[in-house]
Image: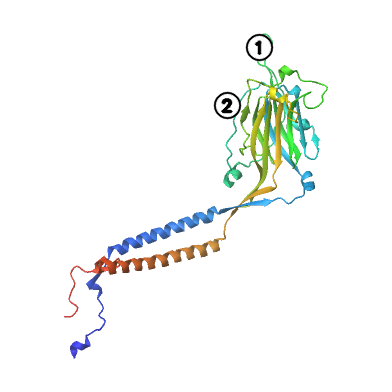
Amino acid sequence: MAGLKTFDAFPKTDDQHIKKSKKVGLTSILTYFFLLLITWTEFGNFFGGYIDQQYIINNDKLQDQVHELVHINLDIYIKLPCKWLDVNSRDITGDHTFVSNYLTFEDMPFFIPYGSKLNILHDIVTPNIDQILGEAIPAEFREKLDTIIPLDENGKPLYELDGCHVFGQIPVNRVQGELQFTAKGYGYMNWERTPYELINFDHVINEFSFGNFFPYIDNPLDNTAKINLDDPVTSWIYDTSVVPSYYRKLGAEVDTFQYSVSQYSYNGTSLQKMTSSTSVPGIFFKYDFEALSLVLTDHRISFFQFLIRLVAILSFVVYTAAWLFRLLDKVLIITMGPKWSLRYQPAAQSQPLLD
């Protein structure tokens, strides 16, 4: 009977008769590493936020848009003396403005700055919200400088002022319209008429944008140049489609405009066969404001919501990993035997259970 007192129908294996598998430590390390990686990623997402991009239809009536002014920011070199240059704007409402009064004209020797794209346009690249906020530094155009031509020892000018530097902000109605650079006496009546041999509308666009003046934001037409050596009497036409864009992040707000552009030109022979408003030599910027507005907002959840989210994700990962570990261990034992168990394996030398 004394032997029966030590009998156990469900015998347990003492700890000294078993040893844990080294695989358990490895899987634990991998699990902890994976949890740490998830935590690091979630913290990055919390501080970085997420971008919400929306397109909003502008429901304003045309009458309201007519009374809403938008500025065109312009900085351009034209190979035509300032005295022969005429600048006007027209829109679909019939509003005609002599915008030369808003611009500054400086005589200059025409040249193409280093780095300008010659006879090609920049690739259209949509900037991200951080790039816009970093480059949205407002500025104003400078005042006109007095042009002093240096003379040589014989009293003759060292260079010829054959170009014109035009820059400034032009207010236009927020409707479809056109900004026109023409020679005096061509396109509009004028008591002066530009000599035909002087007409040359080769040009360099340093800045062309809409809205507030942010000179550090790149636009499709910035730093581009157009030259026609075969026929300087050319009509250069830019057709732009303008989209209002709004950027919001951490209390910072930037309201600006993005645009896409297509460009084409007509030489003197082609102009003689045309009857449209661009049938004279010049530079023409057509603009059309789209009914859609682009809104980019950087959102982020509260820290309390972040903690709840993080705990829920980590708990789910631990729970899932534990069940997968048990399932894999069971499959290995059934298919390959107990010695392949991920959790335990028999000791190399075991002691008898019953002395």
Q: What residue is at 72 percent from the left and 39 percent from the top?
A: 71
Q: What residue is at 25 percent from the left and 84 percent from the top?
A: 9
Colouring rule applied to residues: rainbow
- Identify the residue under disc 1: 152
Where residue 118 appears, as percent x and y from the top left, is 59, 27
Q: Quadrant of residue 187?
A: top right
Residue at the bottom extreme? 1
Name the kind of residue labelled 1 in the image.
Answer: Asp
Q: Secondary structure at mark 1?
A: loop
What numbered label is drawn on residue 114?
2
Where residue 345 appears, as percent x and y from the top left, is 25, 68
Q: What residue is at 32 percent from the left and 69 percent from the top?
A: 330
Where residue 107 appears, as percent x and y from the top left, is 71, 22
Where residue 236 appears, as percent x and y from the top left, is 68, 29
Q: Nearer the viewer, residue 73 or 117?
A: 117
Name the kind of residue labelled 2 in the image.
Answer: Tyr
Residue at the top extreme? 154
Q: What residue is at 78 percent from the left and 39 percent from the top?
A: 92
Figure quadrant of the C terminus: bottom left
Is 7 rendered above or below residue 89? below
Q: Nearer the viewer, residue 77 or 351?
A: 77
Is 220 rendered above or below residue 26? above
Q: Nearer the viewer, residue 354 or 185?
A: 185
Q: Residues within 10 Å of mark 2 (few under 14, many from 20)?
A: few
Structural distance between the alpha carbons of marks 1 and 2: 27 Å
Q: Secondary structure at mark 2?
A: loop
Q: Residues within 10 Å of mark 1 (few under 14, many from 20)?
A: few
Q: Is residue 89 left or right of residue 246?
A: right
